[in-house]
């Protein structure tokens, strides 16, 4: 789907997956005008397909587009395009219990621009791929290392939106951490180097004495849709859930730590390494709260329980 800065959309069309043509002087290639989203479709036992809160992805893309000087599809256009793409690729949605269809909407400045300025034309596209379950057999904890040299976001920057450049910025630290055997990197705030921000592609929560806390949204972490959902699910289950500054000391003294995101859903953290010291969490890292939230959220997403929240959208 192509459109110009005045948001007048041309008609979108379904195309076979393949390379796309792009001007060498396009806004996305030269000035990083690109945003993406990620969501999943699950198949239910009766064969129907469930999307999870696609309007939230649409709203987040619109928020990011505003920051990146880009026009964006309306919530209706976004959701309609997701539905059409998923239905056209129905056969790729794995059977129940065997994974999901990952959906990747992408918005980019595809028009040519030489001097620094927003591109004159934009392209919105969606591609999909089946993915397996993140955890093959039950939950298995991940091991994180706290990054001391690099930051993924700074105040006033673009860390709060899902722009492509944010991911380029984390590749170096993530690659180094993986080479040392860690699952991923946990970032601290760039000002005090003391407060938790997030992992390269997921949000973080700590649990102490049954109180669940997560860093507040303040422009340097991505407002995760799983994060938002877990906060509501946690509160519905009677937990106190706080969004606030969470220090690295609290993290190291927590009873449980877990990450949330579309890919990982709710992923328990088995250990954190900070300044060369490794702290491990109890019950081999799989805490009671993480386990409960994981079960509650995945049951909703897969249509195994009644959706009292109205979060799922069924496609036939
Ligand atoms: N933080 C970052 C940097 C991410 O890339 C993601 C994945 N979109 C998240 C958090 C989690 O967001 P969500 O729950 O919407 O997938």
Image (cartoon, rainbow, N blue to C red):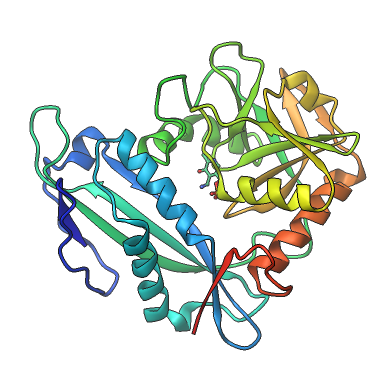
Question: Residue 106 is drawn in which quadrant?
Answer: bottom left
- In the picture shown, does residue 137 fall above or below 160? below
- Relative placement, left or right, of 62 versus 13 is right
Please say whether residue 182 is visible from this viewpoint: no
Q: In the picture, which quadrant includes the N terminus?
A: bottom left
State the residue at coordinates (70%, 49%): 232
Estimate the x, y position of residue 258 in percent, counting from the top left: 74, 42
- In the picture shown, does residue 156 fall above or below 52? above
Estimate the x, y position of residue 63 in percent, counting from the top left: 38, 41
Please say whether residue 124 is visible from this viewpoint: yes
Foreground of the two, 249 or 239: 239
Foreground of the two, 265 or 281: 265
Question: Residue 163 is drawn in which quadrant?
Answer: top left
- Relative placement, left or right, of 3 versus 126 is left
State the residue at coordinates (54%, 16%): 190
State the residue at coordinates (75%, 56%): 294
| The residue positioned farthest toward the top in the image shown | 192
């Amino acid at each position: 789907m192509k459109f110009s800065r005045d948001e007048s959309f041309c008609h979108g069309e379904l195309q076979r997956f393949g390379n796309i043509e792009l001007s060498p002087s396009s806004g996305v290639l030269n000035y990083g005008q690109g945003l993406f989203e990620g969501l999943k479709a699950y198949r239910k036992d009766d064969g129907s397909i469930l999307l999870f809160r696609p309007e939230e992805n649409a709203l987040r893309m619109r928020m990011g587009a505003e920051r990146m000087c880009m026009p964006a599809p309306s919530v209706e256009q976004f959701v309609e395009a997701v539905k059409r793409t998923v239905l056209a690729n129905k056969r790729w949605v794995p059977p129940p219990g065997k994974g999901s269809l990952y959906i990747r909407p992408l918005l980019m400045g595809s028009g040519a621009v030489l001097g620094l300025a927003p591109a004159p034309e934009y392209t919105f596209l969606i591609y999909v791929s089946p993915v397996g379950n993140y955890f093959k057999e039950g939950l298995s904890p991940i091991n994180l290392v706290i990054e001391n040299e690099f930051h993924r976001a700074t105040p006033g920057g673009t860390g709060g939106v899902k722009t492509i450049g944010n991911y380029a910025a984390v590749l170096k630290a993530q690659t180094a951490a993986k080479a040392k055997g860690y699952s991923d990197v946990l970032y601290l705030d760039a000002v005090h180097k003391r407060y938790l921000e997030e992992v390269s592609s997921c949000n973080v929560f700590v649990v102490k004495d049954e109180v669940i806390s997560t860093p507040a949204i303040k422009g340097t972490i991505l407002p995760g849709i799983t994060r938002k959902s877990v906060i509501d699910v946690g509160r519905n289950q009677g937990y106190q859930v706080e969004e606030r500054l969470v220090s690295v000391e609290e993290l190291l003294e927590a009873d449980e730590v877990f990450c949330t995101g579309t890919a990982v859903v709710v992923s328990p953290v088995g250990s954190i390494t900070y300044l060369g010291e490794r702290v491990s969490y109890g019950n081999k890292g799989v805490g009671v709260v993480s386990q409960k939230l994981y079960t509650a959220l995945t049951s909703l997403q897969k249509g195994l329980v009644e959706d009292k929240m109205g979060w799922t959208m069924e496609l036939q």
